[in-house]
Amino acid sequence: MSDRGLLEEQLAYYRARAGEYDEWWERLGQYDRGEEENKQWAGEIGVLLEIFDSLPLDGDIVELAPGTGYWTELLAERAESVTAIDGAPEMIAYNRARLGAKADAVTYVQHDIFEWVPPRRFDGMVYCFWISHVPRSRLAEFFATCRSALQDGACVFFVDLRFDPTGFAVEEIRFGEDPELTLRRLNDGREFTIIKNYYDTEELQDAAAAAGIRLEVGYTSTFFQYGIGFAQ
């Protein structure tokens, strides 16, 4: 399948998954790993929230791939404005519903992120559980787009999964012949092939630096990778 075809299937997957996406985040159904591991998951989210709260993300912020709105809601409570860009209208609808009246502080833009051209420069950028869905062949281009969207000194924050067999679900199938691809199965049995990369620290920091973003990558003990960056 072509690069474009894979990206289209990936978008179709997230459009179809919108209604069940939060089951993964909340560790419900097939994602429930039992009391002890669920507690570890929640504790590591707490670590991420402490980092997030410490960052200067209170100006004019752009969020890429906001999904159902967990991070959008937090941004709406502290930022002067939030622009949320997602290719899936279904995700945007769930995002609006989660935020309720807080959605008044958010400008929603339905757009393919790989085709997005920043209309102006922002004071900060957030993207959670997105960088792993960027093909390696597009990583440099993605960071260049990020840099073009940021004021000098603007803060970047991202979160993603670190590789762990319990991080997603037992039904996730890796393709041995192509380490970028993963087969995902929805609750109704439909299957989609998507891009899922587990970038290492050096790979991300080097790509960001080449685009003009000083990036530090860190990890929680088991589940998450995160990045804190500043546009140079």
Image (spheres, rainbow, N blue to C red):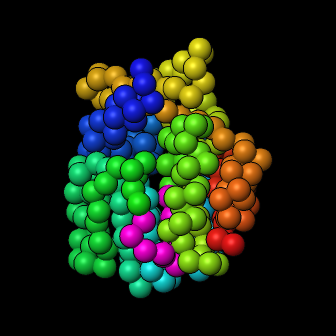
Q: Is residue 79 visible?
A: no
Q: Main secondary structure of the magenta part?
A: strand
Residue 203 position, x and y percent, is 72, 45
Instruction: Locate residue 96: give its quadrant.
Output: bottom left
> Taking 150 as reference, is 210 above or below it?
above
Q: Point out the residue furthest to the right here.
A: 202
Residue 46 position, x and y percent, is 58, 62
In percent of the image, x 25 and y 26: which residue is there? 188
Instruction: Tell me if 107 is positioned left or right of 31 in this view.
Output: left
Instruction: Tell me if 198 is positioned left or right of 216 in this view.
Output: left
Count the marks. 0
Q: Is residue 216 visible?
A: yes
Q: Nearer the viewer, residue 181 or 214?
A: 214
Q: Point out the residue furthest to the top here.
A: 177
Instruction: Locate residue 150: give its quadrant.
Output: bottom right
Q: What's drawn in magenta, residue-wise?
A: 118-127
Q: Nearer the viewer, residue 100 or 2?
A: 2
Q: Nearer the viewer, residue 46 or 194?
A: 194
Instruction: Locate residue 232: give its quadrant.
Output: bottom right
Q: Is residue 120 magenta?
A: yes
> Taking 58 as reference, is 227 above or below it?
above
Residue 50 position, x and y percent, is 62, 70
> Taking 76 as reference, is 179 above or below it?
above
Residue 181 position, x and y percent, is 52, 26
> Taking 70 as reference, is 83 above or below it?
below
